Amino acid sequence: MRSFLAALQFLTLLPVPASRQARLEDLERSLPYYPLVGLLTGGLLALLDAGLSHLFPVFLTSVLLVIALLLVSGGLHCDGLADTADGFFSSRPREEILRIMKDSHLGPMGAMAVVSVIVLKMAAWAAVPAPLRWWTLLLTPAAAYLAIMLNIALLSYARPEGGLGAIFSRKRSLPQALAATAALMAIGWVAGGMAGLSAVSGALLAGLALAAWTYRKIGGYTGDTLGAVFEISTIMPALVASAWGQGGGPV
């Protein structure tokens, strides 16, 4: 329970009892609970969508849902996306990329990346057909957190001096990540059939593509690259579901 609450406290701004505040050892063991935190977050989004859809048109509802996810996560992942874009698009060597990513100032590439991802996410969520919306929202954060889990399982921490993200590499486990992948794919299949399975797969493939790019650029992950993985992976289930509803399969 402590490890789950540590994951909940680290990844979201949802309240955690004061007596259950995370310790370092709890945080180290929290990685397997990331997809579960994602399902909880996705459930909140689906419930919010069910309520807001009776008051507002679908695009405005989707905008509010994207803002809600930003608020729940405290903007943690957007900050990582911005830093990653500033570093990766700088065309500098590895050490300089890491230095740029550590700089707290927002550069032009980071600003463009955040705006582009948020706008695309709003449009993609709004394009999901009504019958597919509940499970798309349910699965989206879970698939994105699973993509983070896979990145940590496959890559080493990139900064030789260490950092907050390094603590997760101590307890990383590829078998655990693969078991979580199988479990979430099964949930996707039960919730949405082949469309649900495809939506989860799309998020994970995006996360793996970013893992390969991250390895090529800096030789491993950082906390910033994990934030970028989350933000980009949260677009993919809606893209898949909207394409499925548009003509890729039955709604």
Image (tube, grey):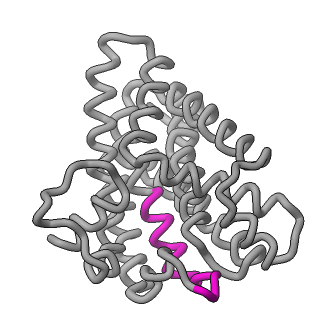
Quarter containing the C terminus: top left
Give the residue displayed 45% in from the left and 32% down from the top. 67
Q: Is residue 97 above or below residue 199?
A: below
**Please, is residue 21 above or below residue 58 in the view?**
below
What is the number of callouts on the image?
A: 0
Task: Give the camera-side residue of 12 and 123.
Answer: 12
Instruction: Give the answer, above or below, for where 218 lies relative to 249.
Output: below
Q: Is residue 48 magenta?
A: no
Please indicate whether residue 97 sits to the left or right of residue 37 in the image. Answer: right
Image coordinates of residue 59 in percent, x first then y, are: 50, 19
Task: Give the magenta-colored segment's residue range.
Answer: 144-161
Name the main secondary structure of what is drawn in magenta: helix
Would residue 220 be found to the left or right of residue 8 on screen? right
Residue at image x 87%, y 69%?
92
* Residue 244 located left or right of residue 49: right
Name the spot of residue 134 as percent of width and height, x first: 33, 35
Asked if residue 177 is positioned above or below residue 75 in the image, the reply reads below
Residue 79: tell me if it is visible. Answer: yes
* Residue 82, image x, y percentages: 66, 52
Q: Tell me if 128 is positioned left or right of 134 in this view.
A: right
Is residue 193 at all visible to an observer of this figure? Answer: no
**Residue 99, horizontal then vertical, whole percent:** 74, 71
Of the 4 image quadrants, the one containing the N terminus is: bottom left
Quadrant of residue 133 within the rendered picture = top left
Front residue of this view, candidates 220 and 39 = 220
Residue nearest the viewer, comparing 249 with 132: 132
Say which residue appears at 48% left-offset and 47% top-offset. 75
Say whether residue 154 is magenta. yes
Write the residue at 34% across / 52% down.
12
